[in-house]
Image (cartoon, grey):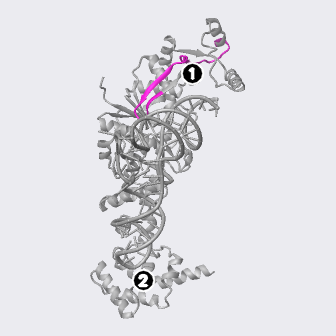
Amino acid sequence: MDRTVRTRFAPSPTGYLHVGGARTAIFNYLYSRHTGGKFLLRIEDTDRQRYKPEWVDAILEGLKWLGLDWDEDVVFQSERLQRYREVAEELIRRGKAYKCYCTPEELEAEREEARRKGIPYRYSRKCLHLTEEQRRKYEEEGRKPSIRFHVPDNLDVTFHDLVHGDITYNTNDLGGDFIIVRSDGFPTYNFAVVVDDHDMGVTHVIRGDDHIPNTPKQILIYRAMDWEIPEFAHLPMILGPDRQKLSKRHGSTSLEEFRLQGVLPEALFNYLLLLGWSPGGNREIISREEAIRLFDIKDVNKSAAVFDHNKLYWMNSEYIRALPDEELIRRLREYNEYLKGKGQGYPVSDEHLPVLVRLFKERVKTLKDFFEYGVFVYREDYPYDPKAVKKRLKDPNIFTYLKGLADRLEALEEWKEEKIEEVLRAYADELGVKHALLIHGSRVAVSGMAVGPSLFLLLEALGKEKVLRRLREVESRVKDMKAGNGE
RNA sequence: GGCCCCAUCGUCUAAGGGCUAGGACGCCACUCUUUCAAGGUGGUAGUGCGGGUUCGAGUCCCGCUGGGGCCA
């Protein structure tokens, strides 16, 4: 009676894993881990038009990246075609299903008539009571039958949804006897799902609430086979900013994309976790372990949620700042390797990584930001921002001052933030100029930018050699730049 | 069009019939400061509408409206 919980995630390999699917996977994963059950994976690859084998790897890769480890072997629907046929045959034997020889043209005619009469279309059941003779005739004509499930008339089907409570459908609203096996021998979605979930011993079907209308049909099949009906939990949809269902079509929604942008998997996990679920109270930053401990389907809410990129990036910055430097360096290296695999890597070597972390850890939102902000750390030909040059290097004596500063700094033995600051401030006093003049000028000289980390930290992290060179070369580089622009 | 689901700040959400409706993102202001962030402080903004039930409704019931989903 009290079976071990078995949940499953069943994506169809038609593209990268998108955030809606990932969220569903996370909830299934958490519920199984919370209850000490199993989390299973099934690939729904029977839609031969849209499915591509390479997407299977992309999806498995995405799940691994998110840290969702599954139990047991992955089930592929394409390998179970024989099993679906067996069950369909059994349904026919039980009088719960029947072969239908109607052609697409005949069915379209029925549909057209319903449309003309303004009534909801339902299959006429023309083939429900075929005689042996009629059947033979059709077979001789070469017609390939589909198999239809015989839906009982005017029967209320009620199921208890763990999120929504009781939901009732009348069988008259189900669209009539639906096809479970197409004439080409492939099972339809609703049929394959039931056979698979039953065979896999799934106890809790946790999926998006766009599947609510499928549920009564599936329950009818369970009943017809005398199979135990699992629990259902339908999760609220994730919507785009336009309040439309967030789908692969929206773009910018796949795990792949967030990974490329430098989002940490634990940040995405945490963000997705909070879309449709809350532990109550004011908790927001929740680790995987805490989530496993706290997660319960009863705390899932019913209403759809709009995906907010902004909050995801905020959360990502929180996670980045919480990472120990060593770990962050490791992540950056790993991330850049990943980018290189996609032909988008940055020319950053290991010695640059600690510098980037030191300078930007407190100010980035993504891993990518480290490389975008820190070009001057790993390239000597870093660009000068023209606006920064104009604003901070406009004093006629600035280049002389910066060279003078370089000379003073050269004499410095201890290359430390505080020491550098002392030298700079003393030199500014000596010149009788504002400290800020040298501070801002130096920043533009060594980084090309008017904004960035504290100057003294910047100089220390960059190292004496680079700083001296850049302070001395800034004049000629700026002149080159202006000359370049002038022509 | 038929059926189903949903409804608290712009967004994510908290509030077991009894609170000045709380937090977070964003935004604004102030603060810190050599810039920009981060941090700190404060502020902005919400129970869709109408009926009930109740001493008392964001919370329960009904209707409307709106949004969404599935099928056609």
Which chain letter goes with mark 1?
Answer: A
The Cα–Cα distance between marks 2 and 1, rounded to whole angstroms, is 81 Å
- Does the stretch in magenta take in A144? yes
Q: Nearer the viewer, residue A70 or A317?
A: A317
Q: Position of residue A261 (x, y in %)?
A: 46, 56
Q: Position of residue A267 (x, y in %)?
A: 38, 52
Q: Which mark is in front, 2 or 1?
A: 1
Residue type at numbered disc 2:
Leu
- On the question of residue A21 being in view, the answer is yes
Q: Position of residue A353 (x, y in %)?
A: 36, 65
For label 2, the crowd category at 10 Å Cα-Cα, with few meaning under 14, some 14 to 19 and many 20 or more, is: many
Which residue was labeled with disc 2? Answer: A471
Q: Position of residue A262 (x, y in %)?
A: 43, 57
| Left or right for A319, reference A152 | left
A311 above or below A399?
above
Q: Nearer the viewer, residue A377 or A171?
A: A171
For label 1, the crowd category at 10 Å Cα-Cα, with few meaning under 14, some 14 to 19 and many 20 or more, is: some
Residue type at numbered disc 1:
Asn
Seen from this angle, which residue lies furthest left? A414
**Circle number at residue A172:** 1
Q: Which quadrant: the N terminus of chain A? A: top left
Q: Secondary structure at mark 2?
A: helix
> Mark 2 vs mark 1: which is more N-terminal?
1
Which chain letter goes with mark 2?
Answer: A
Q: Do the residues marked 2 and 1 share a common chain?
A: yes
- Does the stretch in magenta take in A218? no
Q: Specify the segment rendered in magenta.
A: A139-167
Q: Nearer the viewer, residue A7 or A211?
A: A211
